[in-house]
Each structure stands twice: as C-alpha cells, then as structure tokens.
Amino acid sequence: MAEKMKAALFIEPGRIVLDDKPVPDIGPNDALIRITTTTICGTDIHILKGEYPVERGLTIGHEPVGIIEKLGSNVAGYEEGQRVIAGAICPSGYSNACLEGLHSQDGQSAAHGLKPLGGWRFGNTIDGSQAEYLRVPDAMANLAPVPDALTDEQVLMCPDIMSTGFAGAEAANIKIGDTVAVFAQGPIGLCATAGARLRGATTIIAVDRVRERMDVSQKLGADVVIDFSKSDPVDEILKLTNGRGVDAAIEALGLQSTFEACLRVLKPGGTLSSLGVYSSDLKIPLDAFCAGLGDHRIVTSLCPGGKERMRRLMNVIEAERLDLKPLVTHHYKLDQIEEAYDLFGNQRDGVLKVAIST
C-alpha cells in the first residue's frame, strides 16, 4: 500500500483543495478503509465558507462507503476486503452520552464545555472521507457491512443524509394519519419527507422553489408541493388544513425565515423539528409562539450514527421501502473534487448530491 494518498483538504475559508497526504495510521480499536464512494454535504459547504471552523489541513467529508483495508488488533467480527459503511457520526459506545442513548452527542468533553461537539468526527475533529483512505475510530461500534445486493450508490445516503432526514421525522413524533410540512427539499429535506411517509403521515406538504427538487419530493412521498416563490407557504398550508395547522413541521434549511414559517403553521401542541445548521442567532416571534402558551415542542436532531443505525437504514433500502438513487444527480472522480465543490457549492445544473468515486 502506498504511503501517500489523495485527499480534499481545508486550507482556508473559500479554499478546499486536493493534495497529497500520508495514509492514516490506525490504533488497536480502529480500521482503515479504502474509500470507493463518498460525497459532498451541505455541511462541507458551511466549512468551505468559514461558517463552521475546522483546522487547516483537515481532510473533509463524512459520508464513506469503502472496503476494509486493515483492522486494528482489537477489532473482531470483521474481515479485510469486506464492504462497509460508517456513519457520519461515529460514537465510541462508552461515553456518558452513549450510555444515555444519545450516540450522536458522543465526544463532548470538559475542554469543549457544553458545546455539542457530538460524535461527528469525520471531517470535523479528525480526517474525513474525501480521500483514498479513511481511519474509522472505534470500528466495532461503527462499521456496518454492506449487503452484497446493494450498490455503493444505493447506500451512499445512509451515513448522513438519510439518517439525518429520518431523525427529523422521528423527533417530530409523527403518528399514523398526521399532517406534516417539510420546509426545504434539499437532500436532507427530501429524506425527511420520505421519513414522514414511512412514519405514517398521510398528508405531507413539501415547500421549495426548485422544480427538480419538488419533482423528486413527490416521488419520495410528498402529497402537496408548494412553490414558495409563487405563494406564501404559511397561508397555503393554513388553507390546506382549514386553519387547523400541521401536526409537525420539519425545518431542513437553517434559516430564520423557514424556522419562523414552521412555527407559524403548527397546530397548538404541534412539534417543530429542526434539522437546519444555523449560522446566526434565531428569534422566536411572540405571536407565532403564542407567548409561550401554545404547548409547542421545538426539538433539534444531530444525525444518529453507529453500526446499528446504519444496519437499519440499509434494511430500508434492501427491503425496497425507499429508493434514494434519484438524489445522486452528478458523478465525479476524486481527482475532480474541486470541480465538484464548485458545482455543488453554487447549486448549478439541478444538483442534489454528488457521488465521488476513487
């Protein structure tokens, strides 16, 4: 195996470049996987823009599909050459957060105070997956074998986008027969729409303005699509529900405007499930919040990870309950990743997700 590999490195705000880097060393509890397919996430664009700080020289990316190249001496139950995925969130399995069942919040330490650093390590606190090789820490808690019948592209959304979108629907406590609004139909919002359908919602209202995204949302479960560039989605949703409001509203963009709109369409006692990554302070309007007397719930979610989460998500794909291949709209080689960032970061050509192959 070569000593050097190609990797996408954060240099400074506005610059992620492909360069050489040493192949990672692994410890006794780790695994080294050879990346076969990965992708670019909206969070990577926040990093690129300097809206989320990471160290200079860090390898970016947190959606890995690959083949086990090497196993640490303590890792049992896996074989070199096995196809695997690992979640964007890679919990240790033994932290306080993990033992409380909050695997996504693993990693918080006294050094970080109450900052929810979480178990998001790839492309955040350790080198990530936009490279030829990736070190997976705590491999026995995080590596999930890929069923032979599934392609890389079929499971590519599992490490982050599918897990996050589903988390938004799960946190919203959607019940059979519920009416749900999903604001923004980017990849995460589309997975939230699909998750709402799987949870039993019978009226799903998707809000966006990009025609291609609205078309995909209908394939994934949206019953009604509202183009917010043509009408006020709050007014439209209240009309559709005869003034009742929705049981749950899922915010999947990370803007004040969409957060506020979610709050305004909620019924009394409804749940606002927030998935957005916010880059400025949020304000809660007094009237929409019913002065704090509306019995509303506001919940946030960080992408659940770990091998059991990955196994369950792949079960959904293998059982043909959901097909997320339409989300992969563009394909690039790792050598072209700077070009892929330019396309994805500027949201050209109807891009939803980019598959990066090595």
Image: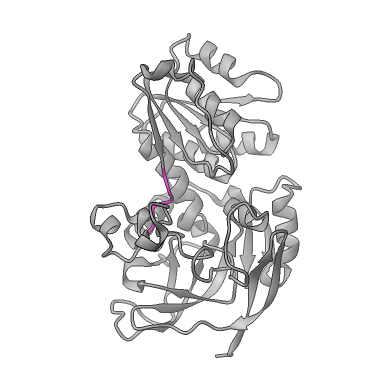
Asked if residue 109 can be seen in this view, the reply is no
How far across and down, in percent of the image, does residue 190 sit? Answer: 54, 40
- The answer, for residue 108, to whether it is visible in the render is yes
Using the image as rendered, state which of residue 108 and residue 236 is in the foreground: 108
Q: Residue furthest left?
A: 99
Query: Looking at the magenta stretch, what is its main secondary structure?
Result: loop
Look at the image and give the residue range highlighted in magenta.
Answer: 301-305
Question: Is residue 304 part of the magenta span, yes or no?
Answer: yes
Q: Quadrant of the C terminus?
A: bottom right
Quarter location, residue 145: bottom left
Frontmost residue, 210 versus 202: 210
x, y (%) of residue 87?
Answer: 43, 61
- Relative to residue 99, is residue 337 depicted above or below? below
Horizontal side of 76 relative to 348 (left or right) equals left
The quadrant where residue 260 appears: top right
Residue 323 in magenta stretch = no
Picture layout, residue 136 above or below residue 214: below
Q: Is residue 81 above or below residue 294?
A: below
> Which image quarter: residue 268?
top left
* Residue at (69% x, 48% y) in the render: 351
Q: Quadrant of the N terminus?
A: bottom right
Query: Residue 199 location, x and y as percent?
Result: 37, 35
Q: Is residue 79 left or right of residue 347?
A: left
Q: Residue furthest top?
A: 242
Q: Nearer the viewer, residue 47 or 222?
A: 47
What residue lies at 45% left-to-right and 16% top-to-bottom? 245
x then y, percent, for residue 17:
71, 69
Q: Is residue 72 above or below residue 305?
A: below
Q: How many marks?
A: 0
Identify the residue shown where x is 57% and y is 18%. 234
Colouring scheme, one of rainbow, by chain, secondary structure, one colour: one colour
